[in-house]
Amino acid sequence: MRVFGTDYDGVIINIEPQKARAFGVLLNKHWGVNKDEAAQFWIETGGKPRRYKFEYFYNKQFKEKLNDEKYQKIEKEYSHLLKDKFYPSLKLLPHALQILQYARSHYDFLFVSSGVPMQEIQYLVKLNGVSEYFNLILGTDKTYSSKREHFQKIITDQKPDLIVYIADGLEDMKIAKEFKAISVGIPTNHSKKKLFDAGAVHVCSLSEVIPLLERLS
């Protein structure tokens, strides 16, 4: 069983910079957080669940845990902002579609592992017209609090001989290494050095992914 997995934002699309700025503006508005600090934190913690990012600043600002009710309220506002302002105009990154087409014809099982809430990532993948390429689209929810749970599910259910995982986040590289996947870091939002330091096996641009996959076959 050959499995191909990918993060979504930063690999198939890229609105991380816009999401980071929106995160900063929202936290400044509601919690008085420095918007530039929040935006930078968003980028630096790519690959971690959205809730983790909100919880970090709530705890830092108010010295208490962010409860479910408060999180759901502010996350709902953030999600609606993305859907209304950013998602409708999104386009796939160059080479992303060709990578999915190649992977669909050369791997047995394809999955998305995203830190975006489950319903939102499934909506987004469908909106971009690429849901047909994936056997499974995973985001975060009460069952899957992080990408570790995604990898655990894939390994338990599919029992793969090989997992290739492509992502642009530093946390993604760490988790892929933990589960002995062949990680391919894409330097969309982080430098090659940072991706290698986080545990990437390979680092390349999207235009170089298919030749790399051919060498790995």
Image (cartoon, rainbow, N blue to C red):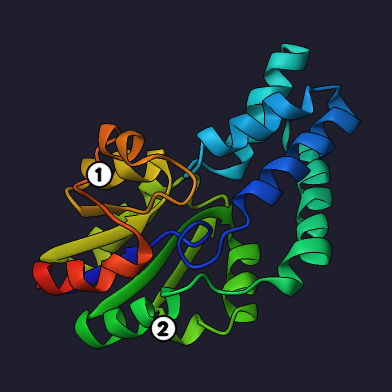
Q: Which mark is residue 133?
A: 2
Determine the secondary structure under disc 1.
loop
The residues bearing labels 1 and 2 have C-alpha atoms spaced at a distance of: 24 Å
Q: Would you call the spot at circle 2 few (<14 residues within 10 Å), some (14-19), or many (20 or more)? A: some
Position of residue 209 in the picture relative to residue 19 (left or right): left
Of labels 1 and 2, earlier in sequence is 2
Q: Nearer the viewer, residue 215 or 63?
A: 215
Q: Amino acid at mark 2?
A: Tyr
- At horizontal 33% and vertical 40% (from top left) the residue drawn is 195
- At horizontal 51% and vertical 82% (from top left) the residue drawn is 130
Q: Which mark is residue 99?
A: none
**Is any part of residue 65 visible from this angle?**
no
Residue pointed to by mark 1: 200
Position of residue 72 in the picture relative to residue 112 (left or right): right
Position of residue 184 in the picture relative to residue 53 (left or right): left
Residue 38 placement (x, y as % from top left) = 69, 29
- At horizontal 23% and vertical 59% (from top left) the residue drawn is 155
Residue 48 placement (x, y as % from top left) = 50, 40
